[in-house]
Amino acid sequence: MSSANPHFLLVDDHALFRTGLGMMLSQNWPGAKVTQATTLTQARAALQHEQPDLILLDVHLPDGHSLMDLPSLRELAPACPVLAMSAEVNGTQILQAREAGVTGFLPKVASASEVLEAVRSALRGQMSYAAVPYDVLTQAGGGQASAPAAMEVAEAPPSLSDRQLNILRYLGRGTPNKAIARQMGMHENEVRAEVSWLTEWLGATSREQAHAEAVARGLLVP
């Protein structure tokens, strides 16, 4: 497929997050094909039949650690860029990602705009660590900020945006996505993607639990 109609292989075992990200990709690339897999085994099976333009790969999967098992995917798709994703971001993982040769690393707390920019950069073959905290990159580089020039490094650790916090407040009130979108001037699919993103990052299994977890962590005032 062309860059205007890319083929994505989305590998993540968290259904809400996977669905939200898939919707975001389809909304921003209307002609795209999005193949979904929940395990490394399913990803390898998909790659035996088709070659995507970009693999979005969760680091922690039920049947393995993606960065350690990446060579098995590389054998099937040697030229395909890989964008690693994780709810946990630390120097060890970034170093593993670099050593594995992934195109970029995307924290799951990243905003929708950061996600889309990371995907666009990866499709262009450019390194994309834009939402990774500067201090984590420094730690991974052995004490020096050795990121390639193409990387855009954030100045501070990732945190929830005002928009994400507002969405969480609406979730605590039981407000449906359509009403949230209307109140915040957003597209309903964008709200749905943000809700899925937040639910995954907070380790929640429902909208209500996501709000409760945000309060418990001190991100929201009860």
Image (cartoon, rainbow, N blue to C red):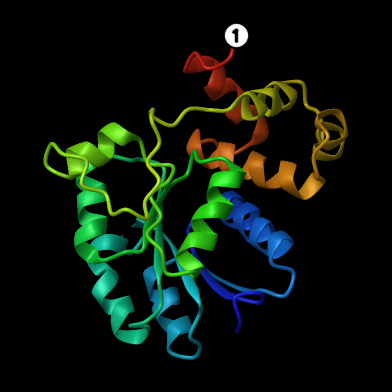
Q: Is the residue 99 above or below the residue 85 in the image? A: below
**Residue 215 horizontal side relative to residue 108, left or right:** right
Specify the amino acid type for callout 1. Answer: Val
Image quadrant in which the N terminus is located: bottom right
Q: Can residue 14 be seen in this snapshot? A: no
State left or right for residue 219 relative to residue 170: left
Where is residue 156 shown, x and y percent of the image?
Answer: 39, 27
Q: Which residue is mark 1?
A: 221
Q: Residues within 10 Å of mark 1 (few under 14, many from 20)?
A: few
Q: Nearer the viewer, residue 123 or 190?
A: 123
In-front residue for pair 175/102: 102
Foreground residue, 90 or 174? Answer: 90
Closest to the observer, 113 or 187: 113
Question: Residue most toward the top?
Answer: 222
Question: What residue is shown at x 41% (from left), y 64% (from top)?
Answer: 126
Residue occupying the point 73% across, 60% down: 27
For mark 1, give the secondary structure.
loop
Coordinates of residue 8 in the picture (x, y in percent): 55, 72
Is residue 13 rendered to the left or right of residue 171? left
Q: Position of residue 89 (x, y in %)?
A: 33, 40
Please tell me whether residue 45 is drawn above or below residue 218 in the rendered image: below
Asked whether residue 43 is in view, the answer is yes
Name the quadrant containing residue 60. Answer: bottom left
Seen in the image, is 171 located left or right of residue 162? right
As drawn, the residue found furthest toward the bottom would be: 49
Q: Quadrant of the C terminus?
A: top right
**The residue positioned farthest toward the front in the image shown:** 149
Residue occupying the point 54% across, 50% down? 115
- On screen, residue 189 above or below 191: below
Quadrant of the rendered image containing residue 68: bottom left
Name which residue lies at 25% across and 68% down: 69
The picture places residue 209, in percent across and down from the top left corner, at: 60, 29
